Amino acid sequence: MGRAYEYRKASKEKRWDKMSKLFPRLGKNITIAAKEGGGDPDLNAKLRTAILNAKSQNMPKDNIEAAIKRASGKDSANFEEVCYEGKGPHGVLVFVECATDNNTRTVANVKSYFGKYGGATVPTGSLEFMFSRKAVFEFEQPEAKSLEDIELELIESGLEEIEKVDDIVYAYGDYTSFGVMSQALEDLGIEVKKAALKRFALNSVEFTEEQLIDIEKLIDRLEDDDDVQAVYTNIA
């Protein structure tokens, strides 16, 4: 267990070093949202969410404004949001979300990472039914509202589950309810700290510490790629 534990500890510490890549990724999300729906957050819900998430990570205001301006620039890259699916070492299922201005480069890189670490990509859609996509909102519970009250007020907007961990409330709904739930939380005067569409494995699998060492090497390499926005697995 010792070697496995130390590797996992080092792996987590390494992810803290990736903070330098966080702002560019957040900025890319802002630029994509602004290109799709315009640079006015009041009229673009996706942009509002991207800015909200950037602020939650303490991204400077100047960086946010620069990312919005890039969307209207003549030389701005045309980013495309794409997903890749694969099976990694020991049969782990991996879902990779990317934002790229060069799909040929990105798919070649992703395939090479899987190949290097004992896995392979699979045709798009192969793992879709093994993951559920959810809208996830994080916020602090208002003093004037109980968790039960919030749950009742959000059910009609698509809320499926709500839980409180420490001081943070997590509200979950189907991904198609993202916009409606976002608006409902705004109407309730609840300040959302983070909001995102995330994927959750329908059937999680437990792996040994030794197997996790191999798996996390692949995950780390994927997360190191500038085009990769998020990586999801079926690790329990």
Image (cartoon, helix red, strand yellow):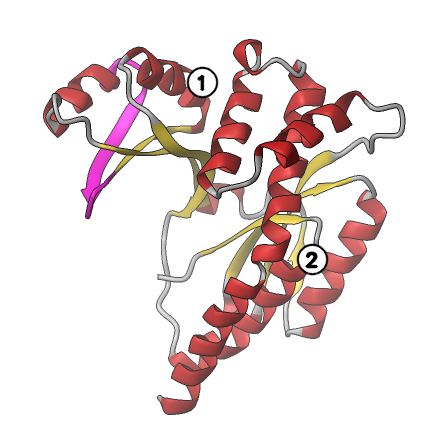
Residue 135: tell me if it is visible: no
Q: Is residue 25 magenta?
A: no
Vertical side of 98 occupied by 71: above or below: above
Return the residue at label 2.
225
The three-letter code of the residue at mark 2 reads Asp
Please, which residue is most extreme toward the bottom here?
2
- Depth check: give the residue in front, 11 or 208: 11
Q: Spot the residue most to the right.
A: 75
The residue located at (44%, 76%) in the rendering is: 8
Front-most of residues 1 and 40: 40
**Which residue is more in the foreground, 7 or 232?**
7
Q: Quadrant of residue 37?
A: top right
The amino acid sitting under disc 1 is: Gly
Q: Residue at x 58, y 47 (%)?
A: 126
Q: Is residue 165 magenta?
A: yes
Mark 1 is surrounded, within 10 Å at the Cα level, by few (under 14), some (14 to 19) or many (20 or more) other residues, namely some
Residue 46 image position (x, y, % from top left): 55, 22
Assign a secondary structure to mark 1: helix
The residue segment tinted magenta is 155-168
In the picture, measured across the screen, residue 74 lies left or right of residue 195, that is: right
Q: Which residue is mark 1?
A: 179
Q: CA distance from mark 1 to mark 2?
A: 29 Å
